[in-house]
Amino acid sequence: MPGIDYSQKIPNNVDLASDKRLQRALEKWQPSYIDWWRGMGPTDFNENEVYLRTAVGVDKDGWAHFDYVKMPDYRWGIFLHPQEAGRKVGFGDHMGEDAWQAVPGEYRNSLRRIIVTQADTEPASVEQQRLLGHMAPSIYDLRNLFQVNVEEGRHLWAMVYLLHGFFGRDGREEAEELLERRSGNPDHPRILGTFNEPCTDWLSFFCFTTYTDRDGKFQLLSLAESGFDPLARTCRFMLTEEAHHMFVGQTGLGRVIERACEIMKSGKDVKAEGGIPLEIVQKYINYWNSSSNDLFGGEISSNASNFFSGGLKGRAYEEKLDTDHKALEGVYNMEVFENGALAKREVPLRNAMNEILRDEYVKDNEKGTEYFNKICRRHEVDFQFELPHRRFNRSIGMYSEGRFDLKGNVLDEATWQERQSDWLPTEDDRAYVQSLMKPCYEKGKMASWLAPPSKGLNNNPVDYEYVRL
Ligand code: BYC
């Protein structure tokens, strides 16, 4: 297995030096990327040394390397999971054929579209989070934010390698565009909805890394099955990085909940003590979870069917599933929304691939909800977190045509208008959360609204100097 070559301008494990054209093209893109980072990344912290984790290998232990790095000097590179000899396409119409090492002509446009959509989310999230460093609740959290940011930058590199390496001139043009679109810019927005939403407080950041990054996990799991082998190998390695982002989100929300529970248990008022009431946490969960549900696309999708039949995008864990990998027969029983009402309908399996992936996502989210409820029970606080129903507050797909409550029941417009402030953050809720967003940079100290983590990083104490300010 080739290790990562750090002697090159662009660290990589794909023997970039042997492909001079590709190397030149990527080295030409590199300064534009650094310019983008210096302008749109966490700009005001470019000169600080941050205790970051860098990949030195693509195996399980390859993550062991931690060191102080100034973010613009981070070694963004191209790291692919090792090639599996004799790998075959594992699903769809081409099942059993050799996995493709080049882009099949007939799927060029679809593959480019999938890769560009995935790629676009990476710089978008860095842009969304760029000002959060100014209001971090601790140095430990500040470092985690920056770790997430540099890894999203690396994910962009991973996708740009595919665009440059396999899509010729179109790919190079798409790579340029990835540095030109801007999160939330009405004239030149990012492609997917959630990635244009403002993320200007840390409660949103923890929800984003819990729910939006978890969408990333499932999209990557399905692309890791792709018959286009370089895409599959790229996504397999990205998944190892994604896990840390969800850890940041899940434990971050857990600590906010824990702090509120501690205050409640002591009989004091959560707001008076500078905590975040659990009802507000639930509303933020409702908001970010529903937006992230949109990221799976429409419930019935011919795009998804084509991606599956072409062997481009499988189901999560497709290889391990004990099932018909062609999905030609069988149906998905869906509750469709038609003429203002829900009705049961059998949908051909291939057309339901987005929904099948969303099912896995919902299951994984439910485990997260249970983790939050355990914290409440441990503190003997009588509060039950609930995951909103997938129909709630949607902007994409058939359920965006109607209004639904948190349990997925159909509502009329008037009831929705009357009730939505009970379910989604109001201006007042947002103003309150924003009022707490003050930096807490004293070593080992935490802001008033969250509990300390149970341990520090890489066997260091919680009060370690994770960022040299
Ligand atoms: N917002 O057939 P449909 C991550 C569009 S996150 C706006 O229903 P399809 C990360 C769609 O483009 C993972 N538009 O959907 C996390 C289409 O437009 P056109 C990102 C949307 O194509 C945190 C139309 O609606 N990965 O990694 O089956 C931090 C109808 O499309 C949205 C990927 O996205 C939306 N939410 O499925 C950092 C994987 N949803 O063509 C990173 C690659 C749909 O009619 N992408 N539309 O103009 C895909 O597999 C698919 O494009 C989607 C959409 C699943 C996203």
Image: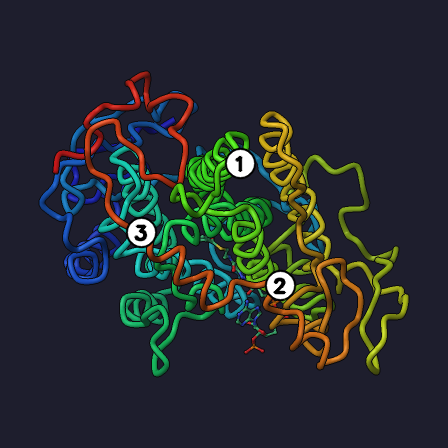
Q: Earlier in the sequence, mark 2 or mark 1?
A: 1
In this view, 366 is above or below 329? above
User: Mark 2: which secondary structure?
Assistant: helix
User: Mark 1: which secondary structure?
Assistant: helix
Q: Residue furthest left?
A: 47
User: Mark 3: which secondary structure?
Assistant: loop
Which residue is denoted by mark 1 in the rendering? 264
| Res. 422 mark | 2
On whether ligand 1 comes within 8 Å of the CB at mark 3, the answer is no
Find ligand 1 in the image and state its quadrant.
Answer: bottom right
Residue 185: give x, y in percent of width and height: 34, 76
Tell me, what colour scheme is on the image?
rainbow
Which residue is denoted by mark 3 in the rendering? 437
Q: Which mark is nearer the camera, 3 or 1?
A: 1
Label total for image = 3
Left or right of residue 216, residue 404 in this image: right
Q: Earlier in the sequence, mark 3 or mark 1?
A: 1
Left or right of residue 58, residue 390 in this image: right
Q: Nearer the viewer, residue 396 or 410?
A: 410
* Disc 1 crowd, CA 10 A, few/some/many (<14, 14-19, 20+): many
Mark 3 vs mark 2, CA separation in Å: 23 Å
Residue 365: give x, y in percent of width and height: 63, 44
| Res. 400 mark | none
Q: Earlier in the sequence, mark 3 or mark 2?
A: 2
Residue at x-position 12% and y-position 38%: 469
Q: Is residue 239 visible?
A: no
